[in-house]
Amino acid sequence: MNLSKQIKKYRTRDQFSQEELAQKLYVSRQTISNWENERSYPDIHNLLLMSVLFNVSLDDLVKGDVEMMRNELQGAQMNKWTISMVTFSLLGAISIGPMMNWFGTKGLLVSFVLIAYSIYSAFKVENIKKKHNLKTYKEILAFQEGRQLTDEEKGEGRKKNKYIKVMMVISSGLITGILTWLSLTFFN
């Protein structure tokens, strides 16, 4: 969490040692060390005391943690929509053959609904990527793991990004086409 960095930042800014801060908060030096090393989390009483002591709002003290938690929730949403996109795309492609075999051309409606939901899921993923300015696979993985990439790491991946996107579109199209062909061949 980011709170550990915030505590250390404000402690060093105000030139407190861990021992001095511990005395002011009536806790042990080890407790301060645990907070700064993410081994434990201060209770609300100590958070309030630190916000007064450091002369910052409680919101500023824990804001990074709130932002990090928000990003974690977004990462979980991205995972959910990605799984949904892949699952319904595969189901849509595989269902074409059986649906046509059992219900004729009217059965294609089921497959199209599955594929349409897959496309909807893809738009949800793209919205999350756009909101967090995620352009490369490396950036997406780091986001889902709650990490930040350096500008240097982002620059490396973005140069290769154009080719990777083209290859991903071609390969997903091929996979979907092959699954559709197999489905049609097997059930007709």
Image (cartoon, rainbow, N blue to C red):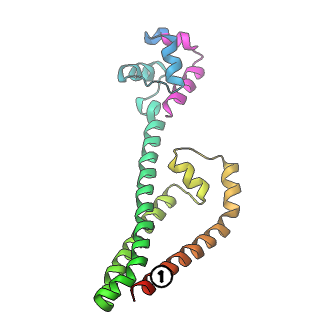
Quarter residue 116 falls in:
bottom left
| Residue found at x 55% / y 14% | 18
Quarter residue 84 falls in:
bottom left
In percent of width and height, residue 58 lies at 41, 29
In percent of width and height, residue 145 lies at 52, 46
Asked whether 15 falls inside the magenta stretch, the response is: yes
Check disc 1 and give the amino acid type: Leu
Looking at the image, residue 57 lies above or below residue 84: above
The quarter of the picture where the C terminus appears is bottom left
How packed is label 1: few (under 14 Cα within 10 Å), some, or many (20 or more)?
Answer: some
- The secondary structure that dominates the magenta segment is helix
In percent of width and height, residue 89 lies at 43, 72
Residue on which the image places disc 1: 182
In percent of width and height, residue 33 lies at 53, 18
Magenta-tinted stretch: 1-22
Q: Which is more toward the observer, 182 or 138?
A: 182
Q: Secondary structure at mark 1?
A: helix
